[in-house]
């Protein structure tokens, strides 16, 4: 059987890389194909990446996270229409799993989206706001969690994580891992204010006897590249280290190294959504500085500590961040729900698929 992953984005974002690997884990005996814009896609993820979008498959799964972002609010962008077109190729043999509908998708773009969703075999989203919007529009949607919850780390990744910390001369018990991102029209947030606050937080973590480490979660395109933001934070808070999982052992996927790191250190501060998801999947409770509906939903449904990024005050947040030190998360119920929801979606495909 051949299944195409449509609307895939990049393997240079470890959250997306984790999503692709999660589909491989749930579909171990399937020929899994996709297409990303990377010149050299990560070969460790278990997906055959083609030069063109998948066609002639038995079934298709719409993957990725906020892929239906529409950055020009009162218009419909070409990128949005291209993603929408993938849903039109073979709708009865296509289902959507583990995505969010960002708030930037509204008006005409949301009207078009829900219209095509109604033709799919199944729709399963990962946050309550997306679920409520779709149900109100007449889409028969199911609510689950992000598919990356099914993932686990590995002994080689654990050894690599320890090696990375040794190279930085940082004791795991003193490490506080932070994820960061750049902001643009997709997510309304002041980029300079974000850098200032995260630098202040890093300084305060250092003063509390911890070693802050900025994890590069994405080295992809435009604002979806954490390197410049990480360097700006380090310049203002020189005690901050930077760890880039894309330049280490090529046999260890970036997401797997991140999971191993989260299990090893005492504190995880998640700005990026998949830092929170992979930390939880590794059994550790993060402090989540969320900036969109997917992060707010994760905090609400799983009762996680955190706050809206726009309201972050590093001084007042520090005690709550320190209170997460070593706190464990029982991930198996969430993992099992994701498995069950995924197999339900598979069952909605036509019998011959």
Image (tube, rainbow, N blue to C red):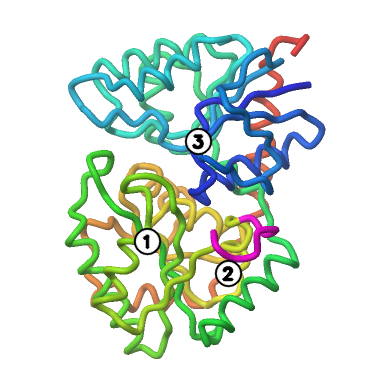
Locate the N terminus and report the quarter of the image it occupies: top right
The span picked out in magenta is 246-253
From the top left corner, tell me how far across and down residue 114 is, in percent.
39, 16
Q: Nearer the viewer, residue 126 or 96?
A: 96
Q: Earlier in the sequence, mark 3 or mark 2?
A: 3
Q: Where in the figure is residue 314, as x and y percent of width and height?
A: 25, 73
Q: Identify the residue position indicated by label 3 in the image.
A: 64
- Specify the farthest residue to the front: 39
Residue at the location (52% across, 85% down)?
A: 170
Residue 261 circle label: 2
Spatial CA distance of label 1 from label 2 is 19 Å
The residue lying furthest to the right in this view is 29
> Mark 1: which secondary structure?
helix
As helix, strand or loop, the secondary structure at mark 3 comes to loop
Q: Which mark is residue 144?
A: none
Q: Position of residue 38 (x, y in %)?
A: 51, 40
348 or 91: nearer the viewer: 91
């Amino acid at each position: 059987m051949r299944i195409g992953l449509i609307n895939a984005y990049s393997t240079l974002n470890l959250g997306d890389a984790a999503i692709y690997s999660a589909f491989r884990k749930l579909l171990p005996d399937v020929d899994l194909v996709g297409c990303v814009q990377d010149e050299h896609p990560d070969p460790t993820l278990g997906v055959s990446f083609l030069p063109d979008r998948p066609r002639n498959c038995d079934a298709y799964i719409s993957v990725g996270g906020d892929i239906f972002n529409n950055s020009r609010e009162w218009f419909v962008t070409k990128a949005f229409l291209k993603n929408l077109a993938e849903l039109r190729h073979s709708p009865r043999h296509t289902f959507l799993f583990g995505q969010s509908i960002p708030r930037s998708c509204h008006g005409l773009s949301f009207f078009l989206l829900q219209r095509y969703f109604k033709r799919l075999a199944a729709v399963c989203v990962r946050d309550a706001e997306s679920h409520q919007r779709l149900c109100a529009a007449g889409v028969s949607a199911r609510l689950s969690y992000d598919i990356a919850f099914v993932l686990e780390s590995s002994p080689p990744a654990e050894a690599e994580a320890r090696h990375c910390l040794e190279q930085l001369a940082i004791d795991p018990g003193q490490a506080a891992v932070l994820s960061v991102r750049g902001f643009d029209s997709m997510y309304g947030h002041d980029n300079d204010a974000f850098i200032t606050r995260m630098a202040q937080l890093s300084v305060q973590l250092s003063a509390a006897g911890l070693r802050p480490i900025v994890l590069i979660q994405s080295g992809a395109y435009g604002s979806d590249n954490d390197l410049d933001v990480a360097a700006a934070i380090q310049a203002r808070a020189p005690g901050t280290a930077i760890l880039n999982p894309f330049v280490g052992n090529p046999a260890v996927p970036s997401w797997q190294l991140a999971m191993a790191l989260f299990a090893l250190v005492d504190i995880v501060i998640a700005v990026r959504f998949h830092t929170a998801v992979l930390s939880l999947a590794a059994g550790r409770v993060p402090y989540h500085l969320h900036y969109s509906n997917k992060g707010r939903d994760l905090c609400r449904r799983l009762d996680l500590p955190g706050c809206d990024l726009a309201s972050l005050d590093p001084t007042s947040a520090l005690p709550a961040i320190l209170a997460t030190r070593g706190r464990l998360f029982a991930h198996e119920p969430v993992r099992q729900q994701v498995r069950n929801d995924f197999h339900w979606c598979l069952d909605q495909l036509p019998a011959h698929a």
